[in-house]
């Protein structure tokens, strides 16, 4: 950690720490990963099938892609619901604070 503080200026280090410890970060990271997975899939993510690979390699790749295709929409949905729930809860708490209009 000290080596990182020597390389990265203090302002950037504090900003990165604030982002990573933010309550929205885990769900946002999952949602970003799901969107990235499907975007790469749209641009030729199945190119392994067009190359000459062994049967075991092809089967492993197909099982991985199948599992990711089935589980990633579920993970994305749960992440979007979590982000929405946290955002609404924080908005409600801000409205309930005295002195706020």
Image (cartoon, rainbow, N blue to C red):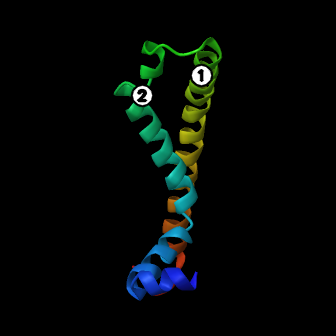
Image quarter (top left, top right, bottom left or bottom right) of the C terminus: bottom left
The picture quadrant where one finds residue 66 is top right
Mark 1 and 2 residues: CB-CB less than 8 Å, in contact? no
- Residue displayed at 37% across by 24% down: 44
Q: Is residue 88 above or below residue 35?
A: below
4 or 52, which is in the foreground?
A: 52
Q: Is residue 49 above or below residue 41?
A: above
Whether residue 84 can be seen here = no
Q: Is residue 53 left or right of residue 43?
A: right
Image quarter (top left, top right, bottom left or bottom right) of the N terminus: bottom right
Q: Residues within 10 Å of mark 1 (few under 14, many from 20)?
A: few
The spot of residue 58 in percent (x, y) is: 58, 17
Q: Is residue 23 above or below residue 53?
A: below
- Residue displayed at 43% across by 40% down: 35
79 or 95, which is in the foreground?
A: 79
The spot of residue 31 in percent (x, y) is: 50, 46
Residue 50, numbered circle: none
Residue 41, numbered circle: 2
The spot of residue 49 in percent (x, y) is: 47, 15
36 or 88, which is in the foreground?
A: 36
Whether residue 58 can be seen here = yes
- Residue displayed at 55% across by 53% down: 27
Q: Number of callouts in the render? A: 2
96 or 44, which is in the foreground?
A: 44
Residue 66, numbered circle: 1
What is the secondary structure assignment of the residue under circle 1? helix
Q: Is residue 36 left or right of residue 93?
A: left
Q: Extreme left residue here?
A: 43
The spot of residue 74 in percent (x, y) is: 60, 35
Which sits earlier in the primary sequence, circle 1 or circle 2? Answer: 2
- Residue displayed at 55% across by 26% down: 69
Query: Label 1 to label 2, Cα distance in Å?
Result: 12 Å
């Amino acid at each position: 950690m000290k080596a990182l503080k020597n390389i990265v200026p203090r302002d950037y280090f504090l900003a990165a720490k604030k982002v990573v410890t933010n309550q929205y970060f885990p769900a946002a990271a999952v949602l970003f990963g799901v969107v990235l997975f499907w975007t790469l899939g749209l641009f030729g993510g199945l190119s392994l099938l067009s190359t000459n690979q062994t049967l075991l390699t092809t089967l492993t790749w197909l099982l991985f892609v199948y599992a990711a295709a089935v589980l990633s929409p579920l993970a994305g949905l749960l992440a979007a619901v979590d982000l929405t729930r946290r955002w609404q809860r924080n908005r409600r708490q801000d409205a309930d604070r005295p002195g706020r209009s």
